[in-house]
Amino acid sequence: MNRAASLWLGLLAFALLPALAQTPTGRIHGHVTNPTGASQSSGTVTLAAPGAGMQDDEGSFPVDNNGNYVGQASPGTYTVIYRTLGMTSDRKADKADNVEIVAGQDTLLDFDMSRREYVDALPADQRRQLEELKRRNSEAMKANDVIRGLNADLMIVTQDLKDADSASDAETKAAKYGEVEALMLRDTQAKPDASILWAQLGQAQLGLMKFREAESSFTKALEVENASKRPNPQVQSLSNTKLAQIHAGTGMVAGTYAAVPVPNQPAQGSPSPAPAQHQYEDLAPPPPAPAPAPTISMGQTKDQVTAAFGEPQRKAAVGPKEIFFYTDMKMKVTFINGKVSSIE
């Protein structure tokens, strides 16, 4: 009985303990834009009590890959500080004063470091670096737009060549080859250093029996490949095979652009000759088109980049940031948390 009574008294005492009070909090969130106008993909947003100094920490929230941050804090008025990755607590990239957080409410606070007053306050050398970076980013974006357009055209061309190869009527073949030729004539002007474009142009011209033009296009593809530090064996093999077929099937001598005999077409000033002996229709059909040239874009993973371009010649890592140096292509790729954040 004494043991049971003691246990009962203990339970009663436990039941009479007051419930612990929970401190109400408010939510704060926002987006960080760097001076170039792009989303900042790293760093920390820190709350500090007004007048306490930048090193006072009332709560810190990481900035994600998309430039967003979010956190909970006790109600009050704060100085909110943004710091870049690795920046010490006595420094700041940007800050906002007198930010009020209210219990149960959401406070939106964005950091836009591309604003005029922020950029104008930068030292002269940093402003020059910023303008140069903006220029290079603009050029890179334009180049990426061109590459995306070329890749889209190559997908169309690959299907058109397959359709032309499988078509049973001459009209469909001519239409498909004509579309490929038109696209590749335009794209080789936009990017003349892409051998795959010249090779695809040559395939279309060969299908249209434009042998001089086809020889020129395949020769150009090989010239581009010979000048490349990383030749594409698929393009080289295709171009060499097609050139051999052209020379064997037409009697043209390599590099001379000799006149191509046209079946049933008499030469000027001479009696009508017998039909040409070369049967161009017997040429082997075009092989499958080589894969499009590798590209790189923001947000790709390290595995995707190495799958397209191979292992870099040099690597460097600082915290979540890692840099791949492709010295043979004069290209530097920066990853943050394993994803491409900049391309130079």
Image (cartoon, rainbow, N blue to C red):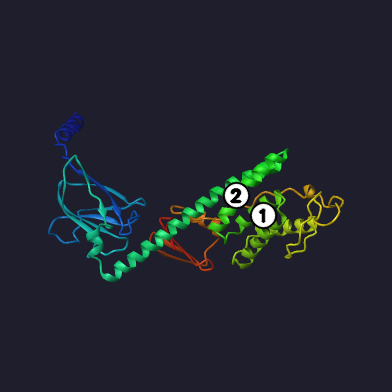
- Quadrant that contains the C terminus: bottom left
Q: Is residue 243 left or right of residue 5?
A: right
What residue appears at the point 80 percent right and 59 percent down from the top-left corner? 251
Residue assigned mark 1:
202
Binning the other alpha carbons within 10 Å of mark 1 as few (below 14), some (14 to 19) or many (20 upward) gives many
Q: Quadrant of residue 94?
A: bottom left
Marks 1, 2: nearer the viewer: 2
**112, above or below 228, in the image:** above
Q: From the viewer's side, name the closer residue of 179 and 35.
A: 179
Residue 75 seen in the figure: yes
Q: Looking at the figure, which quarter contains the N terminus?
A: top left
The residue pinned by badge 2 equals 182
> Residue 202 appears in which quarter of the rendering?
bottom right
Give the amino acid type for the residue marked by disc 2 in the picture: Ala
Which kind of residue does numbered mark 1 sit on?
Gly
The percent position of residue 342, horizontal first and vertical second, equals: 42, 59
* Side of 41 where 339 appears, left or right: right
Q: Position of residue 47 (x, y in %)?
A: 20, 54
Q: Return the residue nearer the eye: 137 or 48.
A: 137
Quarter holding residue 189: bottom right
Residue located farthest toward the bottom when viewing the structure as drawn: 125
Secondary structure category for the residue under label 1? helix
Instruction: Tell which of 126 and 187 is nearer to you.
Output: 187
Q: Residue at position x 85%, y 50% from top?
A: 275
Check the image and name the residue furthest to the top: 1
Mark 2 surroundings: few (<14), some (14-19) or many (≥20) residues within 10 A: few
Q: Position of residue 163 (x, y in %)?
A: 66, 41
- Report, in whole angstroms, how far the alpha carbon at label 1 lies from the one at label 2: 12 Å
Q: Secondary structure at mark 2?
A: helix
Q: Are marks 1 and 2 in contact (CB under 8 Å)?
A: no
